[in-house]
Amino acid sequence: MTLAQFSLGGLVLLPLLAAAVMIVLPHLWRRILGVVFGVLTAGLTVPVIAQVSASNLPELVLGGFEAPLGIHLRGDGLAAVFLGVTALVGLVLTGYAAVVTKAEGSYFSGSSWQPGNPGFWPLWLGCWSGLNAVYLSGDLFNLYVGLELVGLTAVALVALGGRSSWEAALRYLFIAVLGSLLFLAGVGLLVSVTGTLDIEQTREALEQLDDQAAPLLALVLITLGLGMKIALLPMHRWLVPAHSAAPSAVSPILSGLVIKAALVVLLRTWLWAVPLVQGSQWLAWLLGALGAAAVLVGSVLALRQTRLKPLVAYSTVAQIGYWFLAFPLLPTDNNDDALAAGAFHAVVSLAAGHAIAKAGLFAAAGLLKDRCGTDEIDALRGAGVHQPALILAMGMCAVGLIGLPISLGFTGKWQLTTAAVAAGHWWLVVVIAAGTLLTAGYLLRGIAPLLLAPAEQPEDAPAAGPVTQRIRLGEAAVILLGLATIGTGLLGAWLADLLEVGAWW
Amino acid sequence: MISPIDITLGLAVLAVAGLSLIPRSRLVFTMGFLALGIVITMVWLRLDSLDVALAEAAIGTGLLSALMVWLAIRSPEPPGAGGMQSSPRLPWLRPVIGAIAGSGLTMVMAAVWLRVDQQLPAWRQSVDQQLPDTGVEHPITGVLLAFRAYDTLLESAILMLTAAAVLALCRGGGLSTPGTHRLGVHQTSSPMPPVPSALPWAARLLAPALVLLGLWLLFAGSADSGGAFQSGAVLAAAFILLRTSQVSLGTATEHWLRPVLVGGVVIFILAGLLGPVLGLPWLSWEPGWAFVVVLIVEVLLTAGIAAGLYTLFLTLENPEGVR
């Protein structure tokens, strides 16, 4: 067994082991173990990415039982990209949560709510393990189990935000479970016609199938379920309260990473497991139309927010739309591989860029909210005067979200525009341009007041705390994510090479 | 083909499900749910799925009902007295849309389902071939703990993390004072509602029988139906019964709940690590000692599942107090 194969299993099982052990430890030890295993998990992604970068496809047959009986883990290009992004964002956020006590959420002491919930650590490491499980899985049922692990820990992490977050967490739980069940129903339908759960074997069996009704229905069910979990408009209503009520270290995890897990499953289903279903063209167009609506409506709603965290959450709703804009360009009956590959690269670049930039922006918003006691944009006027580096970092994240060069957001939008022009879909270009302008508008509206002179504060306004050493360290996390937003923009070509490994074409 | 029993059972499921949605009282709703669970268990038995029937009876009906009964006694009226208010202007709109969407969905699903040329699972043959290597005899246990052990591991981790989540929402985040590792579930010290005097007596009488049943389900699982999940649910039921009848479990809970909760998952992962240590893939066990590993893992998983389910019951109380 090679190191890369060991890493495939270790990426899932070592953080899970840490999560289990932490449950019996006191708070301080949970933090230490969290940082140690965070570094270890991020380190394990290196051999996998190195193998993929050398055009190999590491594959692990768990227990030595070949499919269809057993489960395969496959580290292909798609998995490698998201493993890398998750390692980067996850490691930075682990450090952020370890130094900023309030970022871990709060607990009820019997008389009042106190900052720093010790339950954050096992849940976060469990969530990281689930994310890696989803990226690597080569088995449809195992994808469901991984999604459940991610969804359940994500819901619990939201609930750590105190009394006000429970309602949002409960709503998120219902959506997450309903989405998973729809996915499972689709998988059940696929198994009944193919007799296998392995993704590669499912594809082979479906290619020999004459009647495409069952795969089409399965695709509809899976897309609907995952659309809920990704929060594609009009199924986005749960996202804003959940992502904005969550603790400061959790919002970046949710917006940056958790919804990407559902996106990876959707791409796996559309491109690897159930491709080329006749009659699925309308579904791709529907997703494209919903994506366009999400870009426009989400951006306008973000412009209308008066609080910083909901603004950033609505920005996520809008950015989700870009990923779906590419779906009409993915192959459903015409086998134009270059076009499809371009659209696929665009989705992955946009999603990866969004993961880093949005994690940074949410971490910054949480830092401001925790220090000032509110995230009303009016009350935050001038808050950036004491934290200029934080505002600079937020600006770098904004570059990624708007899609200015150099960032993965720019790479993704460029690829998407090129693919749209090549396919002759000019309306996509219009949506992308309008979305870009709106993004610049709402981010300016959120960030610019932080630099303005403070307005007259009402007497009862909560007093902003001083900028402590720990908050400075928290700022460093945001700065790292801001720099990564710009730095990853240089990796566009390497990303395309990675995605060639184990691609469906 | 279709016997009258099947039709009766199918109609019974629909009728009980409908009836249990109508009442406004949580207690009546809970009773409806209990009845639904029993009917669905019978459906699984008719389908010859003894394992699923056992799981449905133990977890779906048994434990979930215990949680719901607790809720119904604690706060009998749902918040907002009913919750689902019909829209004032068009009261018929919601039911009509629901009925149209529901019947449309049913028809599409049925049409596709009837057209589909169903395939038998492709793994049937290989299960029979490779079962001797796994150390167990029952194919379902073989799938759960050998062929797809990875899924089972992640599922057990989900239950463990659910328990960790509800503990995190307790006072003090589940720790008795900041800085310690001692379990602090404030609910253990709050009194349970009074119960009829016959219940403690019956609970003490029933508990040994339940423990015996749980252990039988566990050990029979290697050769027959049953296994860690069903057994864990029965054991958790025994604990819930003892707690409801005010038998003091406080000290044992404080010391043992979390080690038992995580023990199964920790040992499962460490056992999975044996493979890479010996140069095999993750979660591989040599046929010679596979049985021992599977047995240890299954016993600890059962204990962990029982502890996890009991934790869910233990932490039902709102940390801020009853409102």
Image (spheres, rainbow, N blue to C red):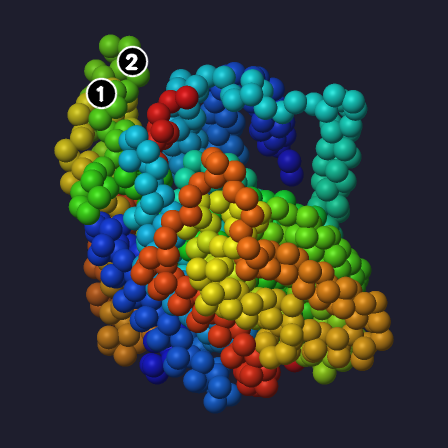
Work out whether A320 lies above or below A309: below
Count the marks: 2
Q: Secondary structure at mark 1?
A: loop
Q: CA distance from mark 2 to mark 1?
A: 9 Å
Image quadrant in which you'd find residue A207: bottom right
Work out whether B242 lies above or below A404: above
Q: Residue furthest top?
A: B197
Q: Quadrant of the N terminus of chain B?
A: top right
Q: Are marks 2 and 1 on the same chain?
A: yes
Residue A132 in view (yes/no):
no
Which residue is at 25% across, 35% downward?
A: B185
The numbered mark at residue B195 is 2
Q: Position of residue A3 (x, y in %)?
A: 34, 81
Check the residue under mark 1 and report the chain it is in. B
State the residue position of label 1: B246
Q: Amino acid at mark 1?
A: Gln
Q: Position of residue B257 (x, y in %)?
A: 22, 41
Work out whether A94 lies above or below A400: above
Residue A34 in view (yes/no):
yes
Work out whether B188 lies above or below A35: above
Q: Nearer the viewer, residue A143 or B110?
A: A143
Q: Residues within 10 Å of mark 1 (few under 14, many from 20)?
A: some
Q: Amino acid at mark 2?
A: Val
Q: Residue furthest bottom?
A: A54
Q: Secondary structure at mark 2?
A: loop
Q: Position of residue A498 (x, y in %)?
A: 54, 82
Image quadrant in which you'd find residue B16: top right
Q: Residues within 10 Å of mark 2 (few under 14, many from 20)?
A: few
**Discs 2, 1 touching: Cβ within 8 Å:** yes
Which residue is at 24% across, 51% downward?
A: A27
Check the residue under mark 2 and report the chain it is in. B
